[in-house]
Image (cartoon, helix red, strand yellow):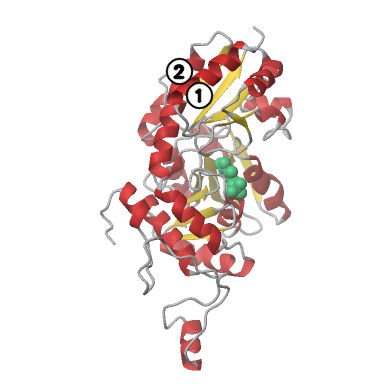
Amino acid sequence: MSKTWRPATQLVHGGTLRSPYGETSEAIYLTQGFVYDTSEAAEARFKGESEGYIYARYGSPTNDMFEKRMCLLEGAEDARAMASGMAAVAAAILCQVRAGDHIVGARALFGSCRWVIETLAPKYGVEFTLVDGRDLKNWEAAIRPNTKVFFLESPTNPTLEVVDIEGVAKLANQIGAKLVVDNVFATPLFQKPLELGAHVVVYSATKHIDGQGRCLGGVVLSSKDWITENLQDYFRHTGPAMSPFNAWTLLKGIETLPLRVKQQTANAARIADILADHQKVARVIYPGRADHPQADIIARQMSGGSTLVAFELKGGKQAAFALQNALEVVKISNNLGDAKSLITHPATTTHKNLTDEARAELGISHGTLRLSCGIEDAEDLIEDFERALSAVAA
Ligand SMILES: *Cc1c(COP(=O)(O)O)cnc(C)c1O
């Protein structure tokens, strides 16, 4: 295996552990445990004196291939595959804090991530502050002597705001805190948080990495030292390990990640432009457009636009519902990153638990829709939108 291969090559070949049978595709090792030739071999394995697997909750060959391939893509030294994106987020945060510590997070977060910081962590005596992550001054002002972790998502769900990752990483380094970045929306292809100074990266592999709607998965990536010192014991003893079957599914998904994300992004860019010119649309937020409010930060830290488009209809909830109901190719679903185009109305689904005021802070109105573009033919998506928009009352 060559570390110098480019990403598309790594994603097809990287991390492959071939059995003596020489199979072309990666094998699925569906086993809970492992056997040892002798008592002495078992003893040496447990002492860490010989290489090898002990129990699937700690690690197993198919998961290992997925973790290694993700490390090559991310430029990380080590990783742990987990059962879902939320298992990964919760582990990345909770494994490194204790009662009396303080977390600073951006307030624009995936709902369950916000729950971990706002509701779960305080139950164990961990304090938090949520800030408007767009302005570095807010991050700086939130720092306390006990701040240990910064957490952010960029671009954010659903309004695709961005946070200056390098700027937040510098603040974290000044006080010896760690920055954890949830990089789902950017995908590992368009943004490299570790290169920008972040200490830990997490993914919901459920999204673009599977990308075909089949299984849940998550992954935490960082330096070898951080994983050994913080995550390893938490991971072994609380049990969020990914199923080897899902690791295999995700390994196959990741082979086509660049092809899918390229097509999804090209489709999203075209739809964003069409929506921006439409008289029934009040506003479009798309990280690939020059009119994105933070286009300067995007140019610095991202190498591509986005597979997602956020937009607001002038006619509010009624128009948003009418558009969703009139779309035929695009399906109504709160998932994202899929080969199928999916659309959701955040105010009544993913963000229904927030007050109108909290939603307004995040730029979500009753007319806001979030589109995740799939890999369909762009012309069919455009026809679908043009037809469905004409069904919306002016
Ligand atoms: C989906 C998602 C998660 C949670 O991932 P699951 O695999 O659904 O547990 C976390 N963060 C972001 C940004 C997501 O989009």
- Residue depicted at x 65% and y 44%: 112
**Mark on residue 231?**
none
Q: Is residue 265 above or below residue 194?
A: above
Dot 1: element: helix
Is 137 on the left-hand or right-hand side of 86? left
Dot 2: element: helix
Where residue 294 appears, as percent x and y from the top left, is 45, 25
Is 376 on the left-hand or right-hand side of 214? left
Q: Is residue 347 above or below residue 106?
A: above
**Mark on residue 273?**
2
Is 324 on the left-hand or right-hand side of 139? right
Quarter placement of the N terminus:
bottom left
Q: Quick check: can you spot residue 287?
A: no
Of residues 298 and 123, the one nearer the viewer is: 298
Residue pointed to by mark 1: 381
Q: What amino acid is labelled 2 in the image? A: Asp
Q: Residues within 10 Å of mark 1 (few under 14, many from 20)?
A: many
Quarter placement of the C terminus:
top right
The answer to which of marks 1 and 2 sits earlier in the sequence is: 2
Where residue 222 appears, as percent x and y from the top left, is 44, 56
Where residue 9 appears, as percent x and y from the top left, is 31, 51
Q: Is residue 198 above or below residue 248?
A: above
